[in-house]
Image (cartoon, helix red, strand yellow):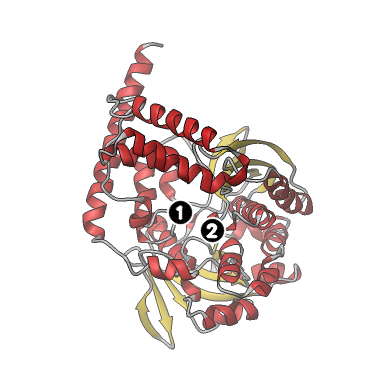
Amino acid sequence: MDVEEISRRHLAAGTPDDEIVRLLAKDILTVKHSRVSPAYAEAFARAVLAEAKNSTDLSGDLFAYEPSGSTMGEFGVGSRGSGDFFAHRQLARIIGRTAAAVGVDEMDDAGAVRAHGDYIITTVDGMHSRLSDFPFLAGFHVTRATLRDVYVMGAKPVALLSDIHVADDGDVAKIFDYTAGVSAVGEAMGVPLVTGSTLRIGGDMVLGSRMTGCVGAVGVARHLTARRQITPGDVLLMTEGAGGGTIATAAIYSGFPEVVEETINLHFLKACEALLASSVLNGIHAMTDVTNGGLRGDAYEMAETAGCRIVIVEDELRTLVQPKVLEMLDALEIDYLGVSLDALLVVAPPEVAPEIRRVVESAGVAMKEVGYVEEGKPESVLSVDGEIRDFTPRFRESAYTPVKKVVDEDKRDFEEMKAGVERAAEAALEKKLRILARLRSSL
């Protein structure tokens, strides 16, 4: 509960000050229960109101931004669908071209810069927002995710960093359980957790116990397996997948807690370790993890970056989903192609595919050929029994919890929202250039 946000909304609606204080104090007492007195709640509410008034209606580059007219939820940001992909491409516009070997404009799993002949890979992943009440799972799965993003760039992870935020009323134990989850994966893979940050969400202003955070990783590579190297004639190979944070969340909130156990494994990371230790790595063009909106989202992004047509063949895809996970997805009517499976997707010339499969399977991980790359407009399509079908990402990834199924039904006009988002991104870019010019003039 963000009491600052509540206060601002009341101010905008013209609610009298005393009424705002009364309502805020009631909310504060609801969350903090017997830990604070009514007098404290009222004093706190008045202080919140004073700060909200002092910080409202400020103008200028440093205080105001161009609104897009769409909320994060309405536009699907973070929901790994077409809205999310569009927003991320606006971020790439704002950042612009850089000297990076792999920059944000390539929409790859991680970025890369050159240093003394090697590539330094950096990436960061946010913990699944619905795992706030399950800190160990949150830490475990976000760490596995960020390590995946380093591995799929052809890099050896060398360090982890963690950032954890818990709201004012959250138990301190959450940061310990979360860190235990992070460390469990790091130690299992021999990658040390070397630094981090611990803060409260919104300081004093956000009440409740909500937790959020991220884990970043740094890796080193000699040979990059970036998406831009995909070429017509390549084939796509995919490993088995049991999912991670998304599948764990679906299981917990849909009444299948026993399925969570299937997500606790290191299959993906072991497969990548085997590839990194093999000479076949140099024959691989690209790798990615099946996460962003499932295979629908990742195939689309890969096609866009490489400028090729990617054909996914469904014939054996279902056999690569862990049976208990697939049974749950089917029971809940969740499209397994539109949800994160945490499988490894490898793109390589057909002549090296058999050796790639041999190496991966030697690590105890199943892998099959699931598609191919051909010349044509940048798009991804699905082949089902020889029939080509549309395979573009949906507005959001598959709705995998009861709440998401409700949210998925409430949609605004996408083209209208895109115009506002583009306008806001352009305004942010122009502001960046204004401030940058000021900074450079002072050097």
Q: Is residue 73 left or right of residue 418?
A: right
Residue at the top extreme, as displayed: 442
Do the CB atoms of the residues marked 2 and 1 lie less than 8 Å apart?
A: yes
Is 115 situated above or below 392? above
Q: Nearer the viewer, residue 91 or 101?
A: 91
Residue tagged 2: 286
Q: Which mark is residue 107?
A: none
Q: Position of residue 377 (x, y in %)?
A: 31, 65
Task: Please identify the quarter of the rendering in which residue 275 is found.
Answer: bottom right
As drawn, the label of residue 228 is: 1
Looking at the rendered structure, the secondary structure element under dot 1 is helix
Q: Position of residue 357 (x, y in %)?
A: 66, 71
Judge the density around disc 2: few (<14), some (14-19), many (≥20) Cα neighbours within 10 Å: many
| Residue drawn at (30%, 34%) of the image | 65
Looking at the image, which residue is at 44% across and 54% down? 78
Residue 368 rendering spot, x and y as whole percentages:
60, 76
What residue is drawn where x is 51% and y is 70%? 235
What is the C-alpha distance between the residues marked 2 and 1? 8 Å
- Identity, as a three-letter code, of the amino acid under mark 1: Arg
Q: Residues within 10 Å of mark 1 (few under 14, many from 20)?
A: some
- Earlier in the chain: of badge 2 and badge 1, it is 1
Name the amino acid type tagged 2.
Answer: Ala
Q: Give the position of the C terminus as an image quadrant.
A: top left
